[in-house]
Image (cartoon, rainbow, N blue to C red):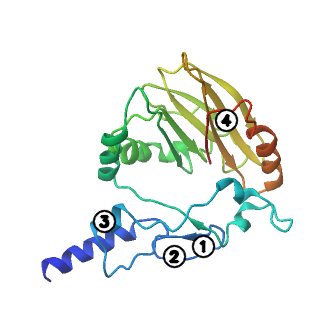
Amino acid sequence: MNLNKIELKIRKILLQQLPYYDTSIIATHGKFNNLIDVELPSKFSLTNLPSLCDVNVFSLNSAQDGNANPNTNLDFSLIRSNYYSPHSFNEIKQKIYDPYRTFSVIHNNLRSLQRNFENFHTHVLIELDFEFDIIGISETKITKANEPLSNVHLDRYNFEYVPTPLASGGVCLNIKSNFNYSVIKQTYTRAFQALWIEIHVPKKKNIICGIVYRQHNSPENFLEYFNNEVLDKNRFEICQVTF
């Protein structure tokens, strides 16, 4: 096997590691743009997968023909999804990061904080080698029954969370310890869990950050909460929301 064929095989294996690599339509998660001609992969393809279009996330929760379920509304939508390797992430970081002007946020749906925290810490945070200002984690699976958790706290971060009453769900935020912040609201229902904080910035506008996990039941309850409480523009002048 010559060198070109070996490189082609390695690149194909790398591409196969990406989510939804071989899927063109996912019944409840729309169409993803990850389909690349695997016969012609390249380094450029790996770090700059094509983006077909943008989608307004708020429109996904809009009722269509009386249907308020965002999963159904997303069936025939295209989603912009860019992939970055740790190398390409660091290239971008060097170009745009300014510790005095940049506010950084990362979100991950971890599917059990206790079980997957070590992998997340090693393969995401350490590999990216970057201290995000806010680290949001959804589907922590923290419940009243399994409190307190052990070995899930990050050095130089404060930890705030909202548990879940169900088997899935739960959210948490890791906030850099140099921030002066207050918890605005914690919501704990069977339909969703939400956590909101306000970071107090001297001589500037405060920054409000929120993380919300919507359960797969009662989308109407989530929509009512989102429309009535989250989209309060008089208060949330600067707002970062992760789902």
Label drawn at residue 26: 1
Q: Which mark is residue 137?
A: none
**Mark 2, other Cα within 10 Å: few <14 / some 14–19 / many ≥20:** few
How far apart marks 2 and 1 lie (CA) works out to 7 Å
SS at mark 2 in the image: loop
Residue 114 % position (x, y): 52, 42
Residue closer to the observer: 193 or 230: 230
Q: Residue at x 79, y 45 (%)?
A: 227
Give amino acid for label 2.
Answer: Thr
Residue 102 visible in the current orientation: yes
Secondary structure type for disc 1: loop
**What quarter of the picture does the N terminus occupy?**
bottom left
Q: If you read the primary sequence from the N terminus, does the residue marked by circle 4 or circle 1 appear first?
A: 1
Tell me the residue at 77%/58% (across/down): 62
* SS of the residue under disc 3: helix
Q: Residue at x 20, y 80 (%)?
A: 5
Q: Is residue 218 visible?
A: no
Q: What is the quadrant of residue 204 in the picture?
A: top right
Report the residue marked by disc 2. Answer: 23
Give the labeled residue for mark 4.
Answer: 195
